[in-house]
Amino acid sequence: MEEKYGSPWLLCHRADLHKELRLLATQQDGVGKPVENPETGSVKLEDAEVINADLIIAADGVHTMAATMVLGQPIPAAPTDTSAFRFLIPTTDLEGASGAEEFLKYKGSMKIFIGENGKRLVWYPCRR
């Protein structure tokens, strides 16, 4: 990936990814709709056509219904005893700030800074 795109990471906004997955799964010449039978790898379309595949991707998040269907029981999200705090700082607010030069040189890409006791700062671009 790095050779092709110049970075080991390919970033996209989660809402954009969900939108594109939904578009690919529901467009006229594509397949889509919820899993009909996870044991056989089949998907039932709106017109009742059933399509079988080796792989069905479910992108329904941490409270997934697909995992429950595949495994036959609910799979609750498990506590990890760690916390993550997400906040946004406009880059323009950091320009000229003491000590910000290290962060600003990565503008437009993702960077992970690891500090004491495994604490991390993940820096990546966001859209408005």
Image (cartoon, helix red, strand yellow):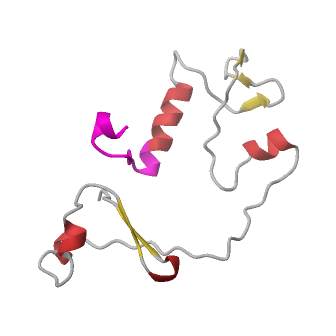
- Give the residue drawn at x 22%, y 72%: 102
- Horizontally, residue 33 falls left or right of residue 69, namely left
Name the spot of residue 67 as percent of width and height, x first.
76, 45
- Horizontally, residue 75 falls left or right of residue 128, namely right
* Quadrant containing the N terminus in the rendered view: top left
Name the spot of residue 66 as percent of width and height, x first.
73, 42
- Horizontally, residue 72 falls left or right of residue 60, namely right
Task: Tell me if residue 18 comes above or below residue 79 in the rendering.
Answer: above
Classify residue 103 by image quadrant: bottom left
Q: Residue furthest right?
A: 72
Q: Residue furthest bottom?
A: 98
- Horizontally, residue 3 falls left or right of residue 14, namely left
Number of marks drawn: 0
- Give the residue drawn at x 74%, y 65%: 78
Q: Residue furthest left?
A: 96
Name the spot of residue 56 as percent of width and height, x first.
67, 30
Which of the pair 31/104 is nearer the observer?
A: 104
- Give the residue drawn at x 46%, y 42%: 17
* Quadrant containing the C terminus in the rendered view: bottom left
Name the spot of residue 22 as percent of width and height, x first.
53, 35
- Give the residue drawn at x 78%, y 28%: 36
Does the stretch in magenta take in 50? no
Highlighted range, magenta: 1-16
Classify residue 120 by image quadrant: bottom left
Task: Tell me if residue 25 comes above or below residue 106 in the rendering.
Answer: above
